[in-house]
Image (cartoon, grey):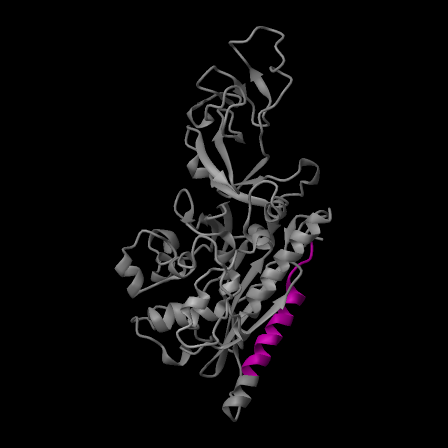
Amino acid sequence: MARQARFLTETFGGYRQAEPPPPEDRLVRVGPGTLGGEYLRRFWHPVAQSAMLKGLPVAIRIMGEDLVIFRDKSGRVGLLEAHCSHRGTSLEFGKIEDRGIRCCYHGWQFDIDGAILDTPAEPEGNPYKGKLYQGAYPTVEYKGLVFAYMGPPEKKPPFRKFDVFEKPGLEFGLGEPVGGNLKPCNWLQVMDNVADPVHEAFLHASISGIQFTDVNGRPVEELADKGEDDYWETEVGVLCHVARRVKDAVWVRSMEYVIPNIIQICKMPLLPPPFTNDADEIEMPQLLTRWRVPVDDENTVEFALVYYGAEDDRSYVSAPSVALSTNRGGRTYEEAQRAPGDYDAQVSQGPIARHGREHLGRTDRGVALMRRMVREGIEAVARGEDPKGLFRNGAVAPVYAAETVKRAARGPTPEADREVVRSVSHALYQKSLATRPRTWR
């Protein structure tokens, strides 16, 4: 007999809370034919890194589909269904040709669009060669990442770029190890982290002591509070601000959720940089764009592009910070317990987080807004419409995230100063709306 759940209403109430609620299937299921899977398939996603394609086919799994990705000898990238349409042997054991790939079992050859080019064991005039197709998906190779569109061919949108991608003087690096950063949990609980900047003051500081430190690694107490958080819906997602008082200035941490599974992050120094000359405002440049792509319902892979100026440090991946290293698996259990990071907070929710266990509060407004956007996108696709964030009339999207330190006189009382901090954060949000291009429309 099912127990009636009565969360948080009595002492020693574990018995009444022991039966877990079901997952919210429309948000977390990503396979072919699922509501969430159909929604995600309306967008381009990174599925591999160029560095993975070194002369042999690579087996990958994306959104519950087993696929093989390869670069043929003419330099083109192919993404095909893994199992050969002849007898089901995996094309990961195939031979890469000048044009496409050839199955190891009976030599059937497939072009990158799936066209059957050769069936050497079959007689001429057979019903396959030059007439039928292996399942395939279109790809775009861009700045070291390979993107795929896995939705209905007739609904394929232009490949989406962000304005920072074309900024003069920037160089690009991969923000994750070759193969991507794998997390054994559902994509949505990884994305929840994006619209939750308040966790930084706790997970990355109060618990592990690694968030706000001076150049000698000592904690900076004045930055230890959670700050004043706020969230705004933009034309492409959710902009998240956390603003803090730092001496004669206000420091606004800015992160951005971009529909459906992207985070934009600005460069964050150990401490706010000092003002020079008569400057009243310092804006930190964009650091990275990171995608969280479902492998299947219970696994996610992260890919990222990191942006470098001519004089910037290149150690983001080669010598990752403690905060970055704790976003990856591979540590011992004791290490994770003593200094937990994003990886541990996300994965420990279980393979699929159960929203029925949650009790959202004021600081979860960004998470609630992000999930609402995903639900609305799923509903739009179910109605036969384009979801929000899709680009039809142009392919350049604005980046609203803009981490900033701005001079601001301290208010006469703590509450008055909190209002000063909040007003600076709101003003910077309005500035980001006014200065970001809208050429994607």
Residue 153 shows in the view: yes
Asked if 66 appears above or below 441 in the picture, the reply is above
Magenta stretch containing residue 258, yes or no?
Answer: no
Which residue is found at the position 61% from the left and 46% from the top? 43
Q: How many numbered callouts?
A: 0
Hey, which residue is sitting farthest front in the picture? 1
Q: Which residues are magenta?
A: 420-440
Which residue is found at the position 38% from the left and 59% from the top? 344
Asked if 342 appears above or below 292 in the picture, the reply is below
Image coordinates of residue 326 in percent, x first then y, are 35, 59
Image coordinates of residue 298 in percent, x first then y, are 46, 48
Q: Nearer the viewer, residue 181 or 350?
A: 350
Image coordinates of residue 13 in percent, x first then y, are 42, 72
Magenta stretch containing residue 433, yes or no?
Answer: yes
**Relative to residue 439, is residue 142 drawn left or right?**
left
Q: Main secondary structure of the magenta part?
A: helix
Hey, which residue is sitting farthest bottom in the picture? 412
Q: Nearer the viewer, residue 417 or 227?
A: 227
Which residue is found at the position 58% from the left and 30% from the top? 136
Image coordinates of residue 78 in percent, x first then y, are 53, 30
Which residue is found at the position 44% from the left and 19% from the top? 104
Q: Nearer the viewer, residue 15 or 140?
A: 15
Hey, which residue is sitting farthest top in the picture? 123
Asked if 346 appears above or below 394 in the picture, the reply is below
Residue 270 shows in the view: no
